[in-house]
Image: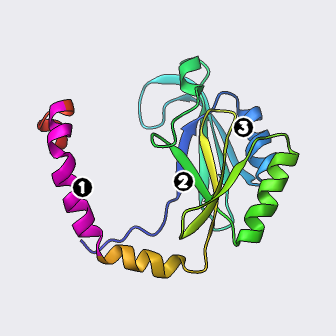
Amino acid sequence: MQVKILRCNHAAFRCRDVAQTRRFYEGVLGLKVKAALAFDQVSGTSLERRYMHIFFEMQDGSYIAFFDSPDDATRAHFERKDSFDVHIALEVASESALLEMQAHIQESGKTCLGPVDHGFLKSCYMYDPNGLQVEITARTANCDSILEQEERHADDMIRQWTENTRAQKVAKFGEDALK
């Protein structure tokens, strides 16, 4: 295939309330609202549903977006998610910027834990008003070299992991689910 993916245009999630979400992403994290689009029908379908789709722009031109769809939202949609299930990691330029952002977040009344040193990244963690874990991260000085080293043995690591966990997954999900 000749076509290459350039970047992530946006990641989208549900929000409980667009104004509350705006206060967090614009007011606390400093992202700019780029678009707030209201609809009465799900785009590309004949399904009637009123919703707002809001986009917050990051410095690199990518977005984080949210759907405010009150007619079909439930409390369960906004329970805190396990970070293994879903989280968003937003990058700042340096460790000092990370610490400055963490202080700002805490001054805004949000709990922001960390920083946690992952070797190639340092990260702080909080939850947004929608139950989504948000990670603010900064690359360490050796980030590129660590990832280059990890890339060299990624295929072997994936193969070994698959061999070690395949039977458990087949038992849990069935062979067809893993094709």
* Mark sitting on residue 161: 1
Q: Is residue 48 left or right of residue 20?
A: left
Q: Which amino acid, mark 2?
A: His
Residue 71 position in % (x across, y down): 58, 17
Read off the magenta span.
153-171
The answer to which image quadrant residue 73 occupies is top right
Q: Do the residues labelled 1 and 2 touch (CB within 8 Å)?
A: no
Q: State the separation of the CA atoms marked 1 and 2.
A: 30 Å
The quadrant of the picture occupied by the C terminus is top left
Q: State the separation of the CA atoms marked 1 and 3.
A: 38 Å
Q: Which residue is drawn at 54% across and 53% down?
A: 10
Residue 157 part of the magenta segment:
yes
Q: Residue at x 21, y 46 (%)?
A: 165
The quadrant of the picture occupied by the N terminus is bottom left
For label 1, count other residues whose C-alpha is less than 10 Å away and answer few (under 14), some (14-19) or many (20+): few
Residue 107 position in % (x across, y down): 88, 47
- For disc 3, the marked residue is 21
Q: Residue at x 49, y 42 (%)?
A: 86
